[in-house]
Image (tube, helix red, strand yellow):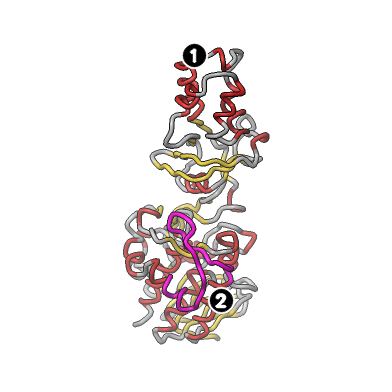
Amino acid sequence: MNDTEVLVLGGGAAGLFCAFQAGLLGRQVTVLDHGAKLGRKILISGGGRCNFTNLGASPANYLSNNPHFARSALARYTPQDFISLVKKHGIPFHEKTLGQQFCDRSAKDILEMLLKECADAGVTIRTGTTVERVTKADRFTVHTSAGPWTADRVIVATGGLSLPTIGATGIGYDIARSFGIPIVDPVAALVPFTLGPAEIRPELAGVAFDAHVVVGKTRFREAVLITHRGLSGPAILQASSYWNPGQDVAIDLFPGGDLGEALAAAHGSKAQILTHLATLLPRRLAEARCLGQQGTTPLNALAPPTLRRLGQEWQHWTLHPAGTEGWRTAEVTRGGVDTAALSSKTMEARDVPGLHFIGEVVDVTGWLGGYNFQWAWASGAAAAEACGW
């Protein structure tokens, strides 16, 4: 039977980070991963450049049934702490927008950094090892496809259900349930919306524009992309994390401005108005959303007050999503292991000493833009610190 002090289940961002942090504290650490390759989500993140943290990461940027749960871990391991590690390894990086930090070269730099830190800390890594179940008597026994492992502590870093094509499974939830730990129902998040046949606009597929997207009381201003099946782009992905089936999504096509006033100012022929609108909106969007909806009356026959009213109506686009693209394209999972069952300081199950849950498997979901990686580092650091007994 294989034996170790700390057994980390999952070789992604949270698992690898936690493993070397625990190794640096003098613990004997082993990582088990069911895949042939480690860190596959790291490698595809940020368009292959890995948006590895965000300077503005705070509890306000995370969704959870307990909005305060992430506060302790985020305060103790900050974006600057991870940036210091990146600098230590000489990895070139840059800030893109809104505090997002990207590798200049490739996401491989971050994965190689984590693997080198694991090697330097004496961490053992086993790939191609599928975890089947976890039990506990005096110590933990992790039953795997390669035989059982025993350990003093088990850290579950198995991720959520997003992107099953690169190996996502629900084993982390199964482990939690086997110990009586509740799960907040997992939902695909940071995911494009699909629209019903009546609302799909295939002639606008590929059009992108800046907008305010509103779901309930939550508002994001970033790019929106119209697709053949619905809507995508950063503002839509952000809003999707807050959306529940049946809710409308409101899009302000001219954020910070008044499209009605812009139409009135351009009062004239249809061509003149279109030329003016095309400086404010993508031309195809202006034609379809605005100029295609004036009815039988020519625009140049409408008085400025009418144009103002129509412009205000056209500016605010309300849609009723049929659903989302689901787990296939979702970047993260909303929901997961219920934080009410965990210590916010150590990520340890309150009723199962020595069992920890970190990263995406926990009911803490970050915004788009490096926030989920920062949660992986911060929650991993919190669990590792608890291993220094």
The residue lying at 64 percent from left, 42 percent from top is 206
Question: Residue 345 location in percent, x, y?
Answer: 32, 68
Q: Amino acid at mark 1?
A: Ala
Reply yes or no: does residue 38 show up in magenta.
no
Q: Quadrant of residue 104?
A: bottom right
Per the image, the residue denoted by label 1 is 303
| Marks 2, 1: nearer the viewer | 1
Is residue 174 visible from the viewing direction of this image?
A: no
The residue lying at 37 percent from left, 71 percent from top is 382
The residue lying at 58 percent from left, 68 percent from top is 105
Question: Residue 49 location in percent, x, y?
Answer: 57, 64
Give the Cα separation between the discs numbered 2 and 1: 64 Å
Q: How many numbered markers are drawn?
A: 2
The residue lying at 55 percent from left, 29 percent from top is 276
Residues shaded magenta? 83-108
Quadrant showing the N terminus:
bottom right
Give residue 112's mark. Answer: 2
107 to the left or right of 24: right
